[in-house]
């Protein structure tokens, strides 16, 4: 079953797996909010449903990553993708079962919503997909296995591009197919076919990358390691016990950078839980229009992160790009919650510019401060911080929009203002870093 990787492996299969995974993930975005509304939910239920995937992925991804060290990347990628296929089957069941009322809630805090059988199946589908949703992280580990110092940056650039392309095409496909007579059923069937294709690519086209498998040491497993899931295998590091969660907090400026990381994900989560509801209830968009919105947003971000950021990075420091980007994102949140489509469209441009300039630049600063020896641990803790912010932010964003509607975007804008004020300290960090290297 297992094949060995040649000295110059073809990375196209793993890029395709990553592309298909992101395509299947993003295809749900334009119509999920409409399903929640049709099945009796409100903005809070939509936010909670959105948080289910990152919540289960938070625990599932580290375990899948460790299993890939033990049993091989290819096998775990296959199992993970099979779980995604089963999740889509459960999702289809949600579209087919009758909308029977199980429980009706009327609350001044939670709002009014009805718990129905299709809603329960939606939650089950997202939980299963999240639990087995470590295929992207395992794909990154696979790419790391087959990359060297000369091609690593280029390979991960291709990986990022495949993710972006999947994120662009997914909402577009969902919007177009959802406008047919089959409505949401056709995009879900398409996602099932996409998952089958991914399984075929993994099984028939993807060679195993990890030949030195690690013997499982379940007796040494500690819960804290979930929060510091390292991309680099522990056995490859000296003094492994010191390369975990506790040691990350001792690295100068890293706790401060992780705070910015957390707040950024929190603000974005407010957007992803609130804007679809805003598009449904205020802008009166269809799933097709929402799909086009997300596709255009992703396309603009690719342009910003590609040609524009490449040009600016040679002329402007990362610290300036983070500060300017956070200001642009703050303006975006003030505009995108408007009831006029034209103003929301302007906010979309600010979102693409702000996110495209700020986020890659901030990740660059984080990587520089982490250093080579602690890079994996720092990135693992950062990913966990982002997951926690997503879980908390999606639920809180749904609750806030359900209670205060447009005020949610103003709160998100205030968060980005805080990030801008915090980013001023990055200039001091950069100055100290230059003095250390002098």
Image: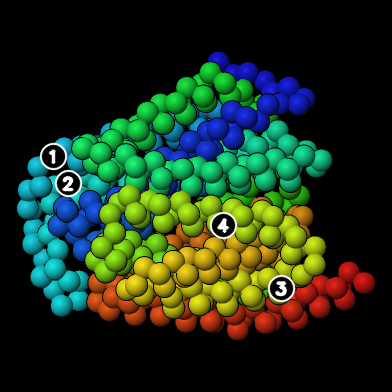
Provide residue 299's location: percent of width, then percent of height: 53, 52
Distance, label 2 to label 3, CA atoms, is: 47 Å
Provide residue 141's location: percent of width, then percent of height: 62, 40
Residue annotated with mark 2: 118
Callout in the foreground (2, 3):
3
In primary-sequence order, the first of circles 3 and 1 is 1
Question: Can you name the residue that lies furthest to the top here?
Answer: 1
Please determine whether, in this image, residue 155 is positioned above or below residue 265. Answer: above
Residue annotated with mark 1: 97
| Discs 1, 2 touching: Cβ within 8 Å | yes
Residue annotated with mark 3: 319
Image quarter hosting the N terminus: top right
Please determine whether, in this image, residue 409 is positioned above or below residue 315. Answer: below
Provide residue 280's location: percent of width, then percent of height: 26, 62
Please determine whether, in this image, residue 426 is positioned above or below residue 93. Answer: below
Q: In the image, which disc is placed on residue 301?
A: 4
Can residue 22 be seen here? no
Distance, label 4 to label 1, CA atoms, is: 38 Å
In primary-sequence order, the first of circles 1 and 2 is 1
Image quarter hosting the C terminus: bottom right
- Give the residue at x 64% y 75%: 324
Can residue 195 be seen here? yes
Q: Residues within 10 Å of mark 4 (few under 14, many from 20)?
A: many
Q: In the image, which disc is placed on residue 336?
A: none
Disc 2 secondary structure class:
helix
Q: Residues within 10 Å of mark 2 (few under 14, many from 20)?
A: many
Left or right: 337 in relation to 150: left
Disc 1 secondary structure class:
loop
In primary-sequence order, the first of circles 4 and 1 is 1
Callout in the foreground (2, 4):
4
């Amino acid at each position: 079953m297992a094949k060995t990787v040649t000295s110059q492996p073809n990375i196209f299969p793993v890029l395709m797996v990553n592309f298909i995974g992101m395509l299947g993930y993003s295809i749900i975005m334009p119509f999920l909010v409409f399903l929640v509304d049709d099945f009796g939910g409100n903005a809070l239920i939509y936010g909670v449903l959105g948080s289910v995937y990152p919540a289960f992925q938070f625990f599932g991804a580290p375990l899948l990553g460790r299993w890939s060290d033990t049993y091989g990347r290819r096998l775990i990628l296959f199992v993970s993708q099979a779980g995604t296929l089963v999740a889509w089957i459960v999702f289809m069941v949600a579209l087919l079962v009758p909308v029977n009322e199980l429980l009706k809630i009327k609350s001044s805090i939670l709002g009014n919503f009805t718990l129905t059988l299709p809603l329960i199946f939606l939650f089950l589908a997202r939980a299963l997909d999240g639990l087995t949703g470590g295929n992207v992280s395992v794909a990154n580990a696979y790419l790391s296995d087959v990359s060297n110092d000369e091609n690593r940056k280029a390979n991960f650039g291709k990986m990022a591009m495949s993710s972006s392309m999947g994120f662009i095409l997914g909402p577009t496909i969902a919007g177009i197919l959802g406008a047919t007579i089959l409505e949401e059923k056709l995009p879900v069937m398409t996602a099932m076919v996409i998952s089958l294709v991914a399984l075929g690519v993994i099984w028939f086209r993807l060679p195993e990358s990890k030949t030195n498998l690690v013997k499982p040491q379940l007796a040494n497993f500690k819960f804290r390691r979930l929060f510091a899931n390292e991309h680099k295998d522990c056995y490859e590091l000296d003094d492994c016990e010191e390369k975990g969660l506790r040691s990350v907090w001792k690295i100068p400026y890293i706790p401060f950078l992780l705070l910015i990381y957390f707040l950024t994900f929190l603000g974005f989560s407010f957007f992803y839980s609130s804007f679809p509801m805003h598009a449904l209830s205020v802008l009166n968009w269809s799933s097709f229009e929402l799909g086009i919105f997300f596709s255009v947003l992703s396309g603009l971000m690719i342009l910003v992160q590609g040609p524009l950021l490449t040009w600016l990075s040679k002329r402007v420091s990362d610290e300036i790009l983070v500060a300017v980007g956070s200001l642009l994102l703050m303006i975006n949140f003030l505009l995108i919650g408007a009831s006029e489509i034209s103003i929301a469209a302007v906010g979309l441009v600010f979102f693409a510019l702000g996110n495209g300039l700020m986020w890659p630049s901030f990740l660059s600063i984080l990587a520089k401060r982490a250093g080579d020896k602690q890079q994996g641990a720092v990135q693992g803790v950062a990913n966990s911080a982002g997951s926690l912010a997503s879980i908390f932010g999606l639920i809180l964003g749904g609750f806030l929009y359900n209670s205060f509607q447009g005020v949610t975007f103003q709160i998100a804008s205030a968060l980005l203002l805080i990030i801008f004020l915090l980013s001023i300290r990055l200039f001091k960090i950069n100055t100290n870093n230059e003095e250390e290297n002098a």
